[in-house]
Image (spheres, rainbow, N blue to C red):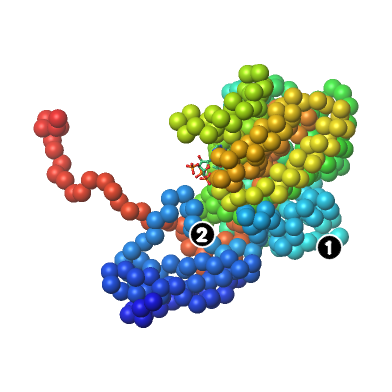
Amino acid sequence: MSAPTSKPVAAPPWPGSKADGVARLELNGETVEIPVVIGTEGERALDIAKLRATTGAITLDEGYVNTGSTTSAITYLDGEKGILRYRGYPIEDLAAKADYVEVAYLLIYGKLPTSDELDSFRMSLSLHTMIHEDMRNFYSGFPRDAHPMAIVGSVVGALSTFYQDSLDVRDPRQVEVSVHRLLAKLPTIAAYSYKKSVGQPLMYPRNDLGYCENFLHMMFAVPCEEYHVDPDFAEALDMLLIVHADHEQNCSTSTVRMVGSSDANLFASISAGISALWGPLHGGANQACVEMLERIGADGGNVKKYVDLAKKKDSGFRLMGFGHRVYKNYDPRAKLIKATCDKLLAKLSIRDPIFDIAQQLEEVALADDYFIERKLYPNVDFYSGVIYRAMGIPVQMFTVLFAMGRLAGWIAHWIEMHHSPTKKICRPRQVYTGEMRREFLPITKRT
Ligand code: ACO
């Protein structure tokens, strides 16, 4: 390799990473040294932050397939090995030993809570579950058939109009109040969006119930009779919220960071994350997956036909709930969800044809060369819908439940970004490929 002819590019102090030598890039006959940084699990990155200033060139990476937008100490995942850890704790341990509120604390505060810390966190969340009474009016304004994700995103954005006393992103106490408000109120906002769609009275939250029980109560209780939450449903929902709680720099989390980077308040940033999550290539895949399984069932249950269709590029059809940008192995979350799904269906003695189709589809796809070569495995969305169906949750609410889980991760990332000494407004560059300068023609001369 030729000796560098330009000065090494200075590395900014990326939080948590270490310098790990330099890479050399030859450009226009010059060799530029690019600092390499390394994370605690050995991931290496070329730090190109100063590349344009030094060489005039930028990097191009549509979809950020190969771009690290930040260092982060929240979640580690290894897509090749199927590893997922929050703050160092394996997802399997957290799903087995903690509940969602405890995991939310871990993600947001960076450590497992002591018993006192957890009690006071739970208490604070319980005390903020109601939404401002005037916000209930929003629900009568939306069309009956509005998608709950649209309602939830709008109402979360509107929190910044009702809770203006906690919008200062530089005041840690105000941020903490917003965090507790969001975690406490999102289940209420979400359940109300469902009640609106079925024309039932909105149920006030009950602070004597746990996080998931309270949500299920608001979803399914009606004022005219007693309703008892099935503890197995609450447990299954809790597990689902935990496995959805964070997944590092995914589309919606990156959106939350991007919006938050302009110092937009937490409610506005989370509302943007909800919109990003809604798409069928991201969180919306759980709804799309169940709809796909229903379609296969209605078409006679021939899974091979649909696996073949997914392999045809011009069909425009993909197996929803299959494949992942990062996982090139079985998604560890899908394993946990499938186990809970088995358990719940057995306990309820439910034979859901959709579950059978899902299992057959998985078997056929995993034995198929197309899926093997591309390392396409079931992802988090493949079996979650089957559990939601067993609990009586309508398909339009699936992505809302994903949002409820992911909220803890979005908040943790928003806070981490604000604490970073290297924080900057996110503003990617582009390579312009449009027209070069041309003369403006008066309308009479245009063809
Ligand atoms: N069905 C059929 N083929 C697929 C699928 C699928 N579900 N997923 C990927 N492929 C193929 C692609 O056609 C491509 O083939 P090629 O190399 O011959 O062109 C190859 O596998 C790589 O796929 P990409 O689209 O390049 O991978 P990318 O990382 O961009 O996309 C994604 C990942 C969006 C998740 C994709 O796998 C997909 O569309 N899956 C279905 C939707 C889904 O389940 N989304 C949820 C993801 S998890 C989450 O967000 C919570």
Q: Residues within 10 Å of mark 1 (few under 14, many from 20)?
A: few
Q: Residue at (54%, 52%) from the top-left corner?
A: 254
Marking on residue 69? 2
Answer yes or no: disc 1 within 8 Å of ligand 1: no
- Residue 344 picture quarter: top right
x then y, percent, for residue 340: 80, 40
Residue 361's place in the image compared with 426, above or below, is above
What residue appears at the point 36 percent right and 61 percent down from the top-left corner? 58
Instruction: Tell me residue 252's x, y (percent).
Output: 57, 47
At label 2, the amino acid type is Ser
Note whether ligand 1 is within 8 Å of mark 2. no
Q: Is residue 416 above or below residue 315?
A: below
* Res. 154 in view: no
Q: The residue under label 1 is which amino acid type?
A: Thr
Secondary element type, mark 1: loop
Q: Between label 1 and label 2, give the one nearer the viewer.
A: 2
Query: Residue 79: x percent and y percent?
Result: 62, 54
Dot 1 or dot 2: first in sequence order is 2
Q: Which residue is drawn at 48% across and 53% down?
A: 64
Q: Decide which of 346, 403 is in the foreground and name it.
A: 346
Query: On the picture, is 235 further left or further right than 45?
Result: right
Q: Residues within 10 Å of mark 2 (few under 14, many from 20)?
A: few
Q: Is residue 55 visible?
A: yes
User: Considering only vertical position in the picture, is 8 above or below 174?
Assistant: below
Q: Which of 434 and 439 is in front in this view?
A: 434
Task: Name the outermost residue toward the left.
Answer: 445
Dots 1 and 2: beta carbons under 8 Å? no
Write the residue at 14% across / 44% down: 439
Q: Where is residue 271 in the image (x, y as percent from the top left)?
A: 58, 43
Q: Estimate the spatial distance between the alpha carbons at disc 1 and disc 2, rounded to whole Å.
A: 33 Å
Q: Mark 1 points at which residue?
A: 114
Label 2 SS: loop
